[in-house]
Structures are given as structure tokens and as C-alpha cells.
Amino acid sequence: MAAISASVRTAVTMPRTWRLRPVDAGALLVGNALFIVAMWWRHGGLDQISTTGGLLTAGGQLTALLGTYTALVQLVLMSRSPWLEQLFGMHRLAGWHRWIGFATLWLLLAHGVMTTVGYATMDRISAPSELWTLLTTYPYVLMATAGMGMFIAVGVTSVRIARRKLAYETWHGIHLYAYLAIALATAHQLVVGTDFMHDPLARVYWLSLYALTAALMLLFRFGQPLWLSLRHRLRVAEVVEEKPGVVSVYLMGRDLDRLAVRAGQYFVWRFLTADGWWRGHPYSLSAAPNGRFLRLTVKEAGDDTTQLKHLRVGTRVFAEGPYGILTAERRSRPQVLLIAGGIGIAPLRALIEEHPAAPGRITLIYRASSWDDIVFREEIDQLMAERGGEVRYLVGRRGSREMPSDPLDARSLRRLVPDIARRDIYLCGSNEMMEAVEDSLHILRVPRARIHAEHFSY
């Protein structure tokens, strides 16, 4: 199963394209927020603002409603919905999820502080005394406070410095507490929420939001991956060490020609071994879908990736996906430029295989610190020759004699590809490398819509 020629590929099912537009998603998001504010107004939210205590409690009600709404939005963004993923890409959704998470935390903190201080002002007692009374008298307040503590833990571990110091498994485990926190907040809202207590329409609305969010999570986080894995019964067919520290895993299964996936996409893979079944990791396909097998290629970067070379033939595999917008479907121009850094060549190598033969239409720039870091060179040279493409290997450490300056800055890219501003750009590598290249492309006035990048981070 080594190098794959286009001649052995068979027709495969393509993922469905959805007609949702960014403006549609934005309008739905803002429209619901405005409707929530309107319901708060209708329920007498402004009637309380004549006194300081009333003003604070009214603000506490509004921040609670908006904080609950943004918490549900967070879950929807990470529901793996194919509509949102295809529209925005998982990296962008993850970024919005993170920032909306911070907004949720501040809104709920504001709710707790404003409500406590508002009640204390009206009762003419100190805020600590009011808080103690609430916690010891009303169980639903204690539940909400516990949920708030969980939200704080999730928020703290989402700060960039904390994420860098935590293993993915630890970070992911802490974030699972967000589900429990939302459940506690829901119980709190059911008991004391003004909307639930006095307005049947608002009660139906909020219950519908909860039900829709839960349905999306269950369907796309659990149902779809389970169905895919049972349908195709993926298993490890072969493990190949491409070179020291780089391994390819070949997977076979049932009806792979009916697996809807495009070159450039990735799955979250779970290899069902004794100690690896519960950990999922995103790895791109390094060969275009061919109806016979799937191939993923990984560079060793930790315990989990190191264990891949020890996988036994026949190991069952659970797959979530496919995900990713680094696909030919995004191309708007006939000419493309692929820029790979290190193992970032994997999805781009699959894209090359899928690209039609057309002399001068495809160029690859492959950046690596040494020739030992170049993966798939023979395959790449063969595929590019078949398609009339051009390959530029940029090898060497920056600052060395052979590469004294950044070979991917704006000036160098313009020299390497004079018509770069008229091409679609596909980019994959380390996050630092991609951010630097994206800055260079902006300097070269390449429209953002024609820069296609896949970031893998948490």
C-alpha cells in the first residue's frame, strides 16, 4: 500500500454541501439574544430600576439570562454540527467557543455579584451576610454556586498559559465539568427563573433551547460517530514507519467507497486498545480517499503518537468526522499554491493526489529544517510530475548559512511564486509557521477568502 497512483482510485461518496450562509448563523445568534432581552423587558425587568437594590437585581436577572444563553451557544459551537463546521471550520468555531466561554463566565459572575449585592441592599445587611443566607437557606443557590465554581475552573484552564502547561487529557477532563455546570444552572433556572415561573411561552422557549442543544450534542458528538464506526468497521490493516519518528497507519473497512470524505479532511481517531480507547486525536488523511483504504500519517510528539507504531493489525478504530475545510471545494481560482511545514504535508499530499492534471496549475512549497524531515518525497515528486506541477523544497534552519533569512516572508514568497496574489493558498504546518505565513500573505494582498488553513490546537 505504499505510493498510490491516481489510476487505482475509485469513485467515492462526497460529503453533502449545506446552503447555510454566515449571515444566517449570525442573524439566528443575535435574534435569539434580542428575543431573550425582549422577554426580560416584558416580564418587568425595567420596573425594578427605581432603587439601587432593584437596579442591581434587574441587572442580575439579565446577565443570568444572557449567560445561560451563551453557555448553550458554546455547546452548539462544539457540537460537531456539519452545518457549522462546513461553514466556518473547526478551528474558527473553537476560537469563538473559547471567547464566548469567557463572556459566559463574566456574565454569570456578574449575575451572582449583582444579585447578592442587590438583595443585601434591599434587606439592609452586608453582602457576605446575604450570601451566607442564600447559600444556607436555598439549595438551588448552592447548586448554582457549585456550577459557578466549575465554570471558573474551566475558564482558568482555558487561558493560553494554562493550556500550554496542561496535557490535553487533563484539559479535556476539566472541560467535561462544563456539562455538569450547565445542568446545575438549568436546575437553578427551572426553580427560580422569572421566565419559568410566570410565562408559559418563555418556558417553552427555554426548554426548546435546551432540547435543541442536547439533540445536537447527542446526534453529532455521539450518534454520528457511532453509526459511522459500526457501518464501516474500520480496523488497522498495516503500520508503516515512513522514517524515524514518522509513522503511517493504513485502515481498511467495509464500504469505504460510501464513506463521505474529501482529501484534506481529518477525523478524530480512537484506537480501541486497552489504554487508548478513551483518547481521541485529530489526524488528517495523507492519501486521497480511494474507496479501498484510508491512510493517516503522524509524527511522534508524545506518548500517544509514539504508541501508534506499536498498533497491532486488526485493531478496531472508532472515528469521528470527517472535519476540516482544507478541501478542493473551497478553491475559487484555477491555480493553487500549497505551503507545507514538516508533517503538515499530510493533508496537502492528499490534495495533490486529488488535483487534476493541468500543467502550471499547482505549486508546492515544502518547508523543513532538514532533509530528514521531508516526508513522502518520492510520492510527491511522482504526483506533481503527473500533474505538471512544481515543487520547491525549502530545507535548512533559519539563520543558518544555507538559509540566513525567513524563506516564507512576503518578499521570498513573491520571488518564489510571482503570481501568488492570483492563486488560492492551502496552508498546513505548525501554528507558529502558519500565523507567520498568513501575515506574509496579507502583506501580499491575498484575500482572506482565498487562504485556506487547518489549525490543530485546543
Image (cartoon, rainbow, N blue to C red):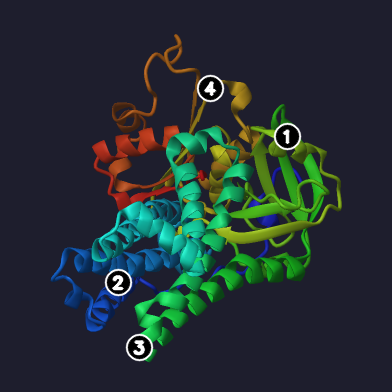
Q: Position of residue 66 (x, y in %)?
A: 33, 67
Q: Residue furthest top?
A: 401
Label 4 vs label 2: CA separation? 49 Å
Of labels 1 and 4, earlier in sequence is 1
Of labels 4 and 3, earlier in sequence is 3
Q: Position of residue 31 (x, y in %)?
A: 28, 75
Residue 199 numbered tag: 3
Residue density around tag 4, few if under 14, some if 14–19, many if 20 or more, within 10 Å: some
Label 1 vs label 3: CA separation? 57 Å
How many marks overall?
4
Residue at x 43%, y 33% (from the top left corner): 432
Q: Quadrant of residue 307?
A: top right
Residue 369 numbered tag: 4
Label 3 vs label 2: CA separation? 18 Å
Q: Which residue is mark 1?
A: 306
Of labels 4 and 2, earlier in sequence is 2
Q: Nearer the viewer, mark 4 or mark 2?
A: 2
Of labels 3 and 2, earlier in sequence is 2
- Looking at the image, which is closer to me, 285 or 103? 103
Label 2 vs label 1: CA separation? 46 Å
Name the residue type under label 4. Ser
Q: Nearer the viewer, mark 4 or mark 3?
A: 3
Vertical arrangement, residue 142 with respect to residue 386, above or below:
below
Q: Nearer the viewer, mark 1 or mark 3?
A: 3
Residue 33 numbered tag: 2
Residue contact between numbered discs 3 and 2, judged by CB atoms under 8 Å: no
Vertical arrangement, residue 39 with respect to residue 294, above or below:
below
Name the residue type under label 1. Thr
Does the rendering let one see residue 263?
Answer: no
Q: Position of residue 109 (x, y in %)?
A: 36, 55
Of labels 1 and 3, earlier in sequence is 3
